[in-house]
Amino acid sequence: MKATNKKKSEGYSSPYDFEGRIPLSQAIPLGLQHVMAMFIGNLTPLIIVMGVCGLTADAGFGELRTALLQNAMIIAGVVTLVQMFSIGPVGGKVPIVMGTSSGFLGVLNNTVAACGGGILAYGAIMGACIVGGIFESVLGAFLKPLRKFFPPIVTGSVVIAIGLSLLGVGINYFCGGSGKADYGSLPNLFLGFVVLVVIVLLKHFAPQKSILSSSAILFGILAGYVVAIIMTLTLPHTGIDADGVQYTYSWVVDFAQVKNAAWIAVPSFIGFGALSDVKITFQASAIIPIGIMFIVTAIETVGDISACIEGGMDREATDSELSGGVICDGLGSAFAALFGVLPNTSFSQNVGLVSLTKVVNRFAISMGAIFLILCGFCPKIGALMSIMPQSVLGGAAVMMFASILISGIQLITKHPIGSREITIISVAIGLGYGLGATTGATAHLPYYVQLIFGGSGIVPCSLAAIILNIVLPKESKPVREMWELEDK
């Protein structure tokens, strides 16, 4: 009690207060939790797109690849700070962490093929991201009059769809990473369970207001990382697949990448320095499909912000929070393109972390954003983070992603649920999400229809919920009354 009073007298407040100031000793680990949750996800889309474009180290683009990954960390940190503190109308002042979006991967792969591949296709993608980002920011500016189309029953359905779409991602991490030769192996599952057990134990058995409890995700991931290093030092590193080919286990921690990384590196602007070969071009074949995806990501950002505010602050998001958040999403993506980085959007992983821990303090989260910027200027730190086994992150991801689902349920249950609400939720989640998330369900539809409705299922779920909310009569019997009538 005396320690608490001392902190209050020094001007400190709670980590559960958005605008409060907390000690650095508390803010740093709470911020690092967010970095751990999104670090690999922030770099992976960029690595994939560079590979599709043929910008590989073997092809002589090693320096370019390093510079782009460096910029991805810096941009994520900068745009996160803008989202939390805002610059005029840009930024919703919400505890959202921004990062490189994986939602654009499908359309970017097709765009690369349409633009002929290579460094020219990458420049066309950057030009399209600038146009699309500005377009999304305009949508955000006019979001207030559109707010009536996003009541809790709609945003709740969207948030549930986001949570559902991430559950598979979390399990893939837990099992070692999709496509890995030892996917689902006992060591990978063991590491995931170590992290999960440590988080649960600290969250519910450590003193509730202690750093161990509030930073349970961080300590769980660190515990898993240490166990992975011990396993690397004591167990064999390679196995043989069914074809007799030798491979390295995905849980092995390889410090060679850290050893080879530089201590200090200055970021490059597109067209200059290490990025001098990348030239921004504007091609309709890239702008149209990527522009459509920016509409999709605006809807997802509305859902992410709604889930974050509901899960972390127990209230609905305001018009200014949603509008500023979407504007930041768009202009942040356009700004990222100037540094050769893919669109920066709200990270659902970190929304799950906020919902799980209830820590919304922007000073704490800004420590994570600053750490990302430092990683960009010091590649050795970034390398240390990037070699962490995916199964370690998976132990935390399964809880964080499921907590987004819970936030969606909280949103739709804020008001009485009647037959009308049940119909909206059932159709939106059942048809919308099911159609979008099932591979091949839209394979025979036109390309742009596949682009909008295929993949995550978030967009078809959103459209179904919005349309039904407009069309269905407003009055409906509460579920309890319906049951009572049936009993009689």
Image (cartoon, rainbow, N blue to C red):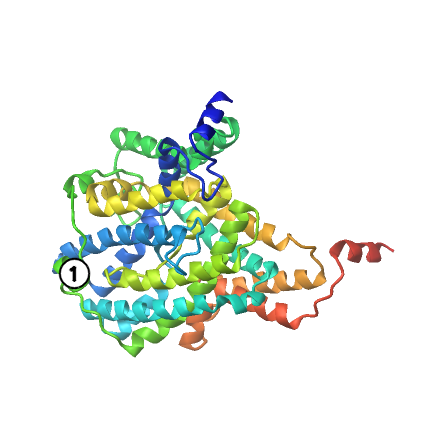
Most extreme residue toward the right is: 488
Q: Which one is in front, 416 or 144?
A: 144
Can you tell which quarter of the image residue 419 is in? Answer: bottom right
Q: In the rendered image of this protein, does residue 176 appear above or below residue 329?
A: above
**How far across and down, in percent of the image, does residue 281 sit?**
22, 73
**How far across and down, in percent of the image, does residue 342 sit?**
30, 61
Judge whether residue 227 can be spotted in this image: yes
> Callout 1: few (<14), some (14-19), or many (20+) C-alpha neighbours within 10 Å?
many
Q: Which one is in front, 179 or 123?
A: 123
Q: In the rendered image of this protein, does residue 12 appear above or below residue 297?
A: above
Taking the spot 32% from the left edge, 31% from the top edge, the residue there is: 226
Can you tell which quarter of the image residue 481 is in? Answer: bottom right
Judge whether residue 175 can be spotted in this image: no
**How far across and down, in percent of the image, does residue 12 sit?**
44, 33
Taking the spot 62% from the left edge, 67% from the top edge, the residue there is: 469
Report the label total: 1
Most extreme residue toward the top is: 2
Instruction: Name the element at disc 1.
Output: helix
Q: Which one is in front, 144 or 438?
A: 144
Relative horizontal placement of residue 58, taking residue 348 as reference (left or right): left
Give the residue number, with chain letter if any, for mark 1.
Answer: 275
Q: In the rendered structure, which amino acid carries the disc numbered 1?
A: Leu
Taking the spot 27% from the left edge, 77% from the top edge, the residue there is: 283
Quadrant location of the C terminus?
bottom right
Taking the spot 35% from the left edge, 69% from the top edge, the residue there is: 134
**How far across and down, in percent of the image, does residue 205 sit?**
51, 27
